[in-house]
Image (cartoon, rainbow, N blue to C red):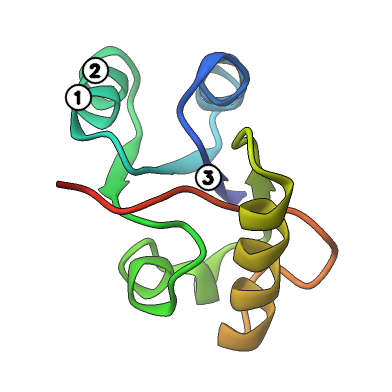
């Protein structure tokens, strides 16, 4: 199953660990390039640096191919925006979660 996790903090990292170990195709989106580098070097996952609520970032993460989007940011507003954006792209969103913020 293709799964996108928005937010690479404690919860996002734990989900990434478990889901990748279970053999799922996981892509992690986060604003912090260091978190993305760490997570892709530890687990067999793809990483995208950027705001998980932004259309272009979700396209880069191939949200239209995802069956599930899991939002784990500390911002409820960003989580909702990411989910809504994913639903607009035709991906896994539309149910109520998602988010991150810009890389720099």
On residue 70, which mark appears? none
- In the image, what residue occupies the spot 32% across and 21% down? 39
Within the image, what quadrant is residue 46 found in?
top left
Q: Which residue is drawn at 63% across and 33% down?
A: 74
Q: Mark 3 points at which residue?
A: 6
**Whole-percent x and y of residue 87?**
69, 79
The residue carrying mark 1 is 34
Classify mark 3: helix, strand or loop.
Answer: strand
Residue on which the image places disc 2: 38
Q: Which residue is drawn at 56% across and 26% down?
A: 12
Q: Distance between the residues labelled 2 and 1?
A: 6 Å
Circle 1 sits in a helix, a strand or a loop, which is it? helix
Do the residues bearing badges 1 and 3 touch, measured as CB atoms within 8 Å? no
For residue 32, above or below residue 25: above
CA gap, disc 2 to disc 3? 15 Å
Can residue 80 be seen here? The reply is: yes
Depicted 13 relative to depicted 69: above or below = above
Q: Indicate whether 47 appears above or below 65.
A: above
Labels 2 and 1 touching (C-beta < 8 A): yes
Locate residue 78 relative to residue 48 in the image: left or right. right
Task: State whether residue 98 appears in this view.
Answer: no
């Amino acid at each position: 199953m293709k799964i996108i996790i928005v937010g690479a903090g404690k919860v996002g990292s734990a989900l990434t660990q478990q889901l990748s170990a279970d053999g799922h195709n996981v892509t992690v989106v986060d604003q912090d390039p260091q978190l993305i580098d760490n997570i892709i070097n530890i687990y067999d996952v793809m990483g995208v640096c950027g705001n998980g609520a932004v259309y272009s970032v979700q396209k880069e993460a191939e949200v239209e191919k995802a069956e599930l989007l899991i939002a784990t940011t500390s911002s409820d507003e960003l989580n909702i925006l990411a989910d809504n954006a994913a639903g607009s792209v035709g991906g896994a969103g539309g149910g109520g979660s998602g988010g991150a913020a810009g890389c720099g």
